[in-house]
Amino acid sequence: MSTGALATLIGQQPYKFPGNDAIGWFFMILNFILFITFTGLIVYRFSAVRGSLAKSLHHPHESFFFGAYFVSLALHLYCLDLYFVPLCGDWLLKAIETLYWSYAGICMLFTVFQYHVIFDRVKLPVTHALPAWILPVYPFLMLGVVGSAILKNQPATAGLPIFIGSIAFQGLGFTVAYFFLTIYVTRLVNSNLPEPPKRPAMYVAVGPAAYTVNTFVALGMQAPKHIPKGFLGIDTIPIGDVFKAMAVAIGVFMWLVSFFFSALSTVSVLISAKDSHFTLNWWAFVFPNVGLVIGLLQLGEALGLPSVQKICTAATAVLTLLWIFCAIMHVRALGRKEVLWPGKDEDMEDVDGNPEDLDGENEGDDDA
């Protein structure tokens, strides 16, 4: 997810330096290689160990992360439009349109099924709520983003259905995500913060508002092109221009919400840095904050603020360095057998479905 998201951010830079496009292509290709590799490993795991798929789906920690796989698929579609459409032409536009609607149908089936399994089979205490609980609906947050991104190249005949669908998908993703984030904030008020190594996962809460900003501002910029004259039977005003103005206002309104969660997560991570060590949660440093930067980048373009776009260019460099840092720490942890190793998995404490220690805290810690 982080690798693909970074590829989309680099590919949208307004101020490009020599080698900028090459770096974007590098991350895009690396993302594809990693996706194929990890998919193969996942298939091997579930085929080699009988019953592991069902156990994973019912696992109070691991089950939420099935959504991350579908988010990765959305990022591939995003990169396909961003990097390959200029090279391949109209036939790819039709293919992307077909893939987009097919992906939307699959996501609906997956999200309903996954939350049904969680609600029916898993009992989770509110005191252990985490932003990761929104991951099964996260693909819908990306459906809005991808839909708004591919509109730039889609013809008018295909554009309006995608335009309307993007609003609907984003509405579902944002609404369900904030149901769960309300529970998460309740946990922060009533219980302890996650233990230090897992606090980077708090950045997942940045995504819903950030990617909603992405969707609405991008849709607003494309509205005059894709909303036809006389839409909804209104002929007195240009509906596309009105939607553009409203969408940018919504983006400004919501961007600070995502920044708030990013700042809150940053403070929580920094004050506990000395007690932290690498976990897979560290990759949340990158992916959600990419949405934050893209949202600001789009607002800077819509409002005609070059200074804001320059800030986003600097932020892109910081996120790239964070990706490199996480990659180095990941390889280091693998070498030391600290992650992805028998007895060292982050969710091994609740592997039997025991919800008493979902984020590494025990009841004694809560009482303290």
Image (cartoon, rainbow, N blue to C red):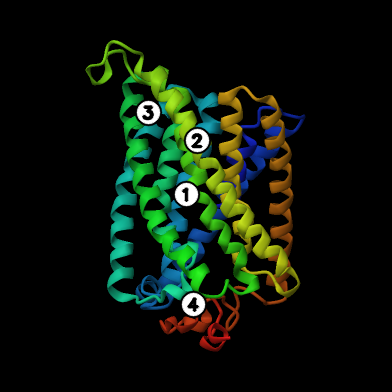
Q: Earlier in the sequence, mark 3 or mark 4?
A: 3
CB within 8 Å, label 4 to label 2: no
Residue at 38 percent of width and 72 percent of height: 53
Residue beneath disc 2: 251
Q: Amino acid at mark 3?
A: Lys
Three-letter code for the amino acid on which mark 4 is drawn? Leu
User: As displayed, is residue 243 above or below residue 50?
Assistant: above
Residue 67 screen position, x and y as percent: 42, 58
Q: Which residue is mark 4?
A: 358
Q: Are marks 3 and 4 in contact (CB under 8 Å)?
A: no
Task: Look at discs 1 and 2 and give the one toward the viewer.
Answer: 2
Please tell me the numbered disc located at residue 208.
1
Crowd class of label 4 (few under 14; some 14 to 19; many from 20; radius 10 Å):
many
Real-space CA distance between mark 3 and mark 2, rounded to the nearest whole angstrom:
29 Å
Residue 252 on image: x %, y % = 53, 35
Disc 1 on helix, strand or loop? helix
Say if 285 sits above or below 279 in the image: above
- SS at badge 3: helix
Residue 325's spot in the image, x, y percent? 74, 57
- Farthest residue to the left: give it: 233
Question: Is any part of residue 155 visible from this angle?
Answer: no
Q: Few, some or many C-alpha atoms within 10 Å of disc 3 (few <14, some 14-19, many ≥20)?
A: some
